[in-house]
Image (spheres, rainbow, N blue to C red):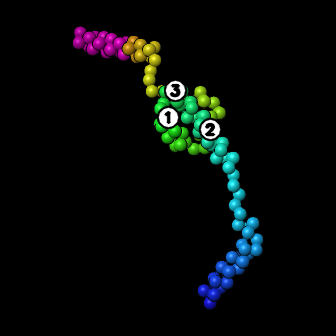
Amino acid sequence: MKRTIGTLASFAVAAILVIRPGLAAADVVPARKAKADKDAAAVEQRLASLGVDSGTAKSSAERLTPSELRFFAEDSSRIQNVGGITWYEFLGGVVVGAAVALATFAVADHAIH
């Protein structure tokens, strides 16, 4: 009984789709993909301008979600190179390190006397 009902239902669905094939048509929304590709290209271009090689830039852009791609593509200055420090950051670190060393030495010297 169940097998015949299933077979009849399958034939009914097949007949409906043959008679009205538009019922099974799917919508195609290429604009989102095109927009994401455009955003990914902008992100890759910004990474390349910061000195990242093209393969790494492409893989980095592929790992981002469409909303992240849109965020960075809107203003490419949001992508920044944070791998190195500037000369004044280095000099500031040396000054602070020297001050901490001097203070530690002064406290230790005072504790000895």
Q: Which mark is residue 54?
A: 1
Measured in 3D between alpha carbons, the distance from the residue under mark 3 to the one under mark 2, in whole angstroms, is: 17 Å
Task: Name the N-terminal-most of marks 1 and 2.
Answer: 2
How dense is the environment of label 1, judged by Cα within 10 Å: few (below 14), some, or many (20 and up)? some
Query: Does residue 37 show up magenta in the picture?
Result: no
Tag 2: Cα neighbours inside 10 Å, few (<14), some, or many (≥20)?
many
- Residue drawn 63% across and 82% down? 6
The chief SS type of the magenta part is helix
Tag count: 3
Which amino acid type is shown beneath numbered disc 2? Asp
Mark 3–mark 2 CB contact (< 8 Å): no
Image coords of residue 49 (percent x, y) = 54, 27
Q: In the picture shown, does residue 58 fall above or below 79?
A: below
Q: At which x and y percent is residue 81?
A: 50, 27
Q: Amino acid at mark 1?
A: Ser
| First of labels 3, 2 by sequence position | 2
Q: Nearer the viewer, residue 69 or 29?
A: 29
Mark 1 vs mark 3: in front: 1
Question: Is 99 inside the magenta-drawn segment?
Answer: yes
> From which residue to which does the magenta span run?
96-113
Give the residue number, with chain letter if any, for mark 2. 39
Left or right: where does residue 100 sit relative to residue 72? left
The image shows residue 50 at horizontal and vertical percentages of 51, 26
Judging from the image, what secondary structure is the residue with disc 2 in? helix
Lateral position of residue 83 relative to residue 64, left or right: left
Q: Secondary structure at mark 3?
A: loop
Q: CA–CA distance between discs 1 and 2?
A: 16 Å
Secondary structure found at label 1: helix
On screen, 27 above or below 84?
below
- Residue under the point 33% across and 11% down: 102
What residue is pinned by disc 3? 50
Judging depth in this view, the residue of 58 and 107 nearest the camera is 58
